Amino acid sequence: MENKFLGIDGRITATNKKGYCSFCSRHQELGFFNVNTKSHSLDNFSSIAQYV
């Protein structure tokens, strides 16, 4: 982003589901990846999640 490295820190939880992975584009066993994000104010948090 703007010629700077941007990293993501999140948590992955094992599931007993099979489906389509958003990262590798294959049908396989999935985990639930969750990232907490912070908005413009210090006390406003939201969450983004995906099965991967």
Image: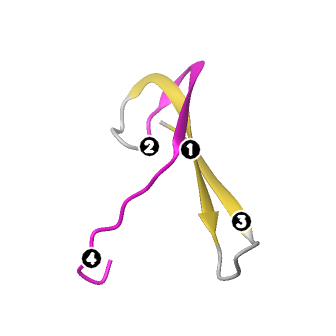
Determine the CA span between mark 4 and mark 3. Answer: 23 Å
Between 30 and 43, which is closer to the camera in this rendering? 43
Q: Which mark is residue 45?
A: 3
Tag 2 near tag 1, CB within 8 Å? yes
Return the residue at label 2. Answer: 22
Mark 2 or mark 3, earlier in chain? 2
Please tell me whether residue 7 is drawn above or below residue 24 in the rendered image.
below
Between 43 and 25, which is closer to the camera in this rendering? 43
Mark 1 or mark 4, earlier in chain? 4
Determine the CA span between mark 2 and mark 3. Answer: 23 Å
Q: Which residue appears at 43% of the width and 56% of the height?
A: 8
- In this rendering, position of residue 43 left or right of residue 23: right
Magenta segment range? 1-22
Return the residue at label 4. Answer: 4
Determine the CA span between mark 2 and mark 4. Answer: 24 Å
Mark 2 or mark 4, earlier in chain? 4
Q: Pointer 3: residues within 10 angstroms few (<14), some, or many (20+)? A: few
Under tag 2, what secondary structure? loop
